[in-house]
Image: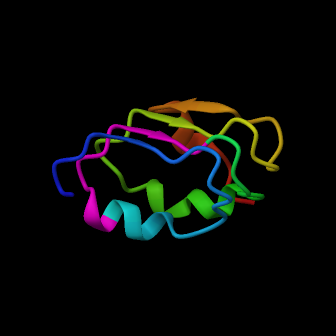
Amino acid sequence: MPMIERLELCDNKLSCGLEVIFKHAPKLRLLKLANNFFSSVKHFDCLKDSTTLELLNIHGNPLGKYTILQAPLWSRVPSS
């Protein structure tokens, strides 16, 4: 899994566990998590140290106004 650059996990009822993804896929550039159950930007704290992530799609999650976050903008999302 270390060579994966694109991962689509839409519609899977996920609400946690992103730290595991980045532990095993450190070269991930695109991550689609649309229509899951992430309810807070705190779930994405583990992604702030990623140097490769360019696009994060979180459309359809119950966390408010954010839908598609692109680097470096997404790193500015407040964690509270």
Query: Where is residue 15, by image quadrant?
Result: bottom right
Pinpoint residue 49: horizontal percent, then vertical percent: 38, 56
Identify whether 64 is placed above or below 2.
above
Going by the image, does 35 lie left or right of 22?
Answer: right
Residue visible at 30% across and 45% down? Answer: 28
Identify whether 39 is placed above or below 66.
below
Which range of residues does the magenta coloring cover? 23-33
Give the camera-side residue of 23 and 32: 32
Q: Residue furthest front?
A: 12
Query: Where is residue 53, by image quadrant?
Result: top left
Going by the image, does 50 lie left or right of 78?
Answer: left
Say whether residue 26 is magenta: yes
Say whether residue 55 is magenta: no
Going by the image, does 78 lie left or right of 30?
Answer: right
Pinpoint residue 80: horizontal percent, then vertical percent: 75, 60
Residue visible at 51% across and 48% down? Answer: 9
Going by the image, does 43 lie left or right of 29?
Answer: right
Residue visible at 57% across and 57% down? Answer: 44
Identify whether 3 is placed above or below 30.
below
Q: How is the image coloured?
A: rainbow
Pinpoint residue 41: horizontal percent, then vertical percent: 68, 55
Q: Residue furthest left?
A: 3
Give the camera-side residue of 40 and 13: 13
Give the camera-side residue of 49 and 14: 14
